[in-house]
Image (tube, coloured by chain):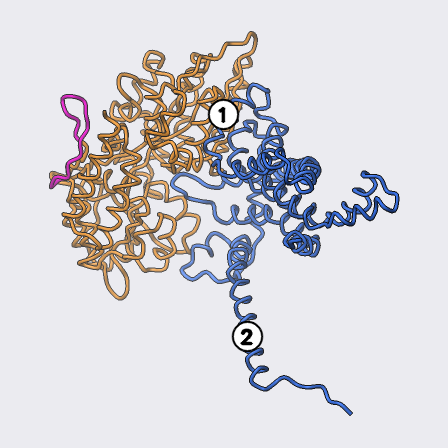
Amino acid sequence: MTTASRPPRGLLVRRRAARTGQYLALLGYLVFLGFPLLWLVSTAFTSPRELAGLHPGWIPDHPTLDNFRQAFDEQPLLRAGANSLLAALAAAVIAVVIATPMAYVMARHHRSPLSRAATGWVVVSQAFPFVLVIIPLFLVLKNLRLIDSLGGLILVYVVWSLPFALWMLAGYVRAVPPELEEAAAVDGAGRLRALVSVTMPLLAPGIVATALFAFINAWNEFFFALVLLKSPEKQTMPVILTHFIGAEGVADLGPLAAASLLATLPSLVLFAVIQRRITSGTLAGAVKH
Amino acid sequence: MRRRGFLAGALAAPAVTGLLPGCAPQRRRRTGGKVRLRFQSLAWQKESVDAVRRLVGEWNAAHPDITVEYLQGSWDSVHDQLLTSFEAGEAPDIIHDAADDLADFAYGGCLADLGGLLPRRLKDDIPEQSWRTTTFGDGVFGVPFLQEPRVLIAHRPALEEARVRIPTARDPWSWAEFEDVARELTRGGRHGVAWPLKEPVSATLNLSLSTGGRLFHRGADGKVTIRFDAADQRVPRTIHDQVVRDRTASRTTLGMGGSDTLPGFFGGKYAMVPLGFSYRQQIVQQAPEGFEWTVLPSPAGPGGDQRQGVSPQTLSIAEDSPYREEAIRFLDFLLRPAPMVRLALGDWMLPTGERALRDPALRTRRYGWATGTALAGTLRPAPAQSVRGYPEWKDKVATPALQEYYSGAIGLDGLRDRLVGDGNLVLARYQR
């Protein structure tokens, strides 16, 4: 009879200590990440009088929906949310549709001069702060008659997120072994069939992660929307949120928190729904072959 | 009044500014038929937004051929947004802003000179010292219409308990008396005063007018230099001594904005807080039931001098607007005495118009309105708001220097070296 050999006692203790340390670090990180969100939730349900108390608590003594009522009463949150959603969804979809084939070419033909130039462009484009491009961009869009238009804003978001999306997707494509496409070709599949049936399913997590990145970028973006959109009925959520802030940074804190909470919901829901796909996609993109 | 954004910060350096085209766009062309004026308002609280919207509605109903389109801007980002819009020739026709934000736009040719356009009624109704806040060079680049003095908001029972003399606008405390009162009020874990000095420069400069402080001196050649004389030192020294030496002022509020001090004020940690007049609205909304508070005038300088600097809210017209005459007519309509009162009540501020100031609604003792209106005649243009290079001096030199001085990290000599030595180097770059 054989018995499974147990690791020495010292090793077990060290492993347990390491695991406890990991959990503590994770807990600390979660608190660090969660604190602003929890405070936002708490503030959104607290009355102005209670907020001005010397020791406001996490849980309001008299929870109220008045802040939400006031926020909806004072600002067109639904319309702004719809505008943001339209701009962010369109930007994400268009960016991914453009970036996917480009990333494929960049990854599969990475030695070609064109691919190298594209990679260089991606890197250089990240070096420009947008304060330097906003005025020329404004003039270009004006000539295209795209000022005060959600179409113009979507175009800017696509262009702005494209380099990073390209770089991100190229990493995912590199993680898919070309041998799989070659095997499909041996089995009689054409280039398109191999791409659609073999490569794309493997790329799906990366595409989702990239789309989510583009979506969140566009959803949270403030300055382009502020400058490019004039008409009140076209303004997006981040711009509307600033209407709760007055001179010298004085803010209508309760309604601002309520509106901000609503503004974070789409990102939270999206993350919750596709979290697993993102994790696996991110890991796939990280593997070097 | 508002924060200059990151775009303004990036363009503050003269080297970067040089890369950009000037702000002197061609005037847009009139289109035939109906006139449409775009009016960007920064009103943000419900009462003031409602007041502005109602007035725009009244105008549109009475003037079907000149439609005003209401756009809501934000104090937080107005400078960056206007800067970009001016550069691209897409600015609103009528622009709501603050006097201390106008200098760059006025000198840059972005705003129309209203000097020859203003109707006599409006010109006469607003006093000369208010017009000076929007006068840059030879031109008038905005109509100042709302302003707020800095006042002391005090916990009334604490004053009564300490049996100190209650100051009035006619008989204010001197700065020395204010220091004594703060000592009287400091007891049992409570500070006599809390200075919210997140933005220490404007508070210090504006209050220093009462002691004769000027700081910025324009020479015969038109160039501005900084001096830090005895009159300039009185107010900062008072604040420093209260925080560092007497401990009659709370150290923790030095980095706070006005709103941040209110919980401590309501909770009895401070007896007085120097705040802008409009903060009364927050106090009314947030103070616990039964909390008794009162509005007192800021301390006065020698001879009862109560002057203080202000930067009023303004309405300007874009240089490239083809509808200046129509825009001026709208401004004249919006700033008649009765609408000006409505706007002032909505923002809890004082109107600049003298006829509006006489309105009984602004003379009531309730919520300290009477104290504020009594101070209206003492308000002057904020020092340095027309000095080129002031924003950079404020952000890079004066703000950190004053913060260090008020917290006790440097002394008065160190403060002088920084404000004057470093400050004049900054100004010199703008005056070559």
Q: Nearer the viewer, mark 1 or mark 2?
A: 2
Is residue B421 left or right of A13 when viewed as pictured?
left
Q: Chain of mark 2?
A: A
Is residue B104 left or right of B64 when viewed as pictured?
left
Question: SS for tag 2?
Answer: helix
Q: Which mark is residue A18?
A: 2
Name the outermost residue toward the top: B32
Q: Chain of mark 1?
A: A
Is residue B172 left or right of A276 when viewed as pictured?
left
Is residue B12 left or right of B29 when viewed as pictured?
left
Question: How dense is the environment of label 1, judged by Cα within 10 Å: few (below 14), some, or many (20 and up)?
Answer: some
Q: Amino acid at mark 1?
A: Pro
Q: Earlier in the sequence, mark 1 or mark 2?
A: 2
User: From what the image shows, is residue A237 above or below residue B197?
Assistant: above
Q: Label 1: which residue?
A: A136
Name the quadrant containing residue B187: bottom left
- Give the magenta range: B217-231
The answer to if B167 sits in the magenta stretch is no
**Front-most of residues B83 and A241:** B83
Residue B209 is situated, as x and y percent measured from the top left of the image, at: 19, 36
Q: Amino acid at mark 2?
A: Ala
Chain A: its colour in the image is: blue
Chain B: its colour in the image is: orange
Question: SS for tag 1?
Answer: helix
